[in-house]
Image: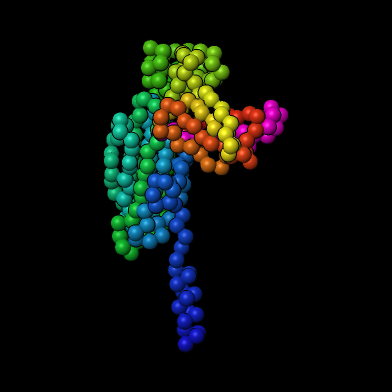
Amino acid sequence: MIRTLLGILVFAALSVRADDVGDVPANAELLDTGTVTRVIERYDDVDVFQLPVLPYVTNVVTVSTGTVFDCEMELYAPPGLVISLATNTAVGVPQSLEILNTSMATRAYLSVKSLAEFTTGSYQVALSQRFADVNGNGLPDEWEVAKFGGVTNITAEGDVDGDGFSNRNEWLAGTHPNDPGSALRISRIQRSTNGTLVTWTSLPDGRYRVQSATNLFAAWNTLPDTVLADSISTTSAVPVVATGNLFRVELIY
C-alpha cells in the first residue's frame, strides 16, 4: 500500500508543469522585437503577452503553432488603435495581426490558448515593427509630417529643440521634438518620512522605472518595481533604503 501511494504521488508531481507565461495581463510577459518560443502546458492554459505599440509604426505580431495542434490568439488593444484583425485561429501556418498607432506610445495584450482538449506543445510568437522612411534617417515619415509638416533632413541623433533629448527619443517617448518644454522630466522631489516622492511628466499607459544615486560618480540603483502611468504626471515613492541625492526616470516603453 505504501509503495502504491508513493508511486501515485510521484506520478502526480511529474505530470504538473510550471506555467511559463502569466495567464492575466497583470502577469503578462513583455515581448520585444524578435521571436520567443513558449509552451501550452494544458488545455485551459492561456498565455498572455504585452507588447509596446510605438507611435507612427505598424506593429506586427505573428503566431506559429509549432507542435500545438490548434491554438487561438486574441489581441486586446486600448481605444483609438487601428487593428487589422482582432482574432484568428492559427492552424499549421503562421498567422499575423497588425496594429497601427498614430498618436503615442502605448501597449496592447495578446493571449494564446489551445482549442483542443488533448493538445499541449510549443508555439512561437514574433514581434516586428515597420514604417516608411524615404530619407533613411531612422524616423517614421508620418511622425516627421505630424511634427514638422513634412519629411525633413533631421537625424535620429539630432536635437532640434535643444532640450537634451534626441529626435529618436522624442519619437519613442511621444514628446514634441520641436518644443523644448515637451520632454520627459522630473518635476518635483519631495522628502517624506518613509523615503522620497519623485514626480515626473509621463505618458498615460507608459511604463517607467526610477533610479537613484548618492552622487554623480556613484552607480545608479534601480528600483525593482516599474510604474505604469495613468496620466500626464506620475509620482512614485522611493523607499528609504533606495534614496539618494540624485534621481532619474526612464521610459521603458
Name the image quarter holding residue 135. Answer: top left
Q: Position of residue 16 (x, y in %)?
A: 45, 66
Q: Is residue 75 visible?
A: yes
Q: Is residue 39 above or below residue 250?
A: below
Residue 25: where, in percent of width, then height? 39, 46
Q: Position of residue 218 (x, y in %)?
A: 70, 32
Which sits in the foreground, 173 or 92? 173
On the question of residue 129 being in view, the answer is no
Q: Position of residue 13 (x, y in %)?
A: 48, 70
Task: Judge left or right: residue 188 versus residue 212.
Answer: left
- Residue at horizontal 38 percent and vertical 61 percent from the top: 42
The part of the chain drawn in magenta is 205-222
Instruction: Determine the residue positioned at 43% across, 24% down.
Output: 174
Q: Residue at x 45, y 72 (%)?
A: 12
Q: Please, is residue 166 above or below residue 126 in the view?
A: above
Whether residue 92 is in magenta: the answer is no
- Compare residues 195 and 233 and report the one nearer the observer: 195
Q: Quadrant of residue 204?
A: top left
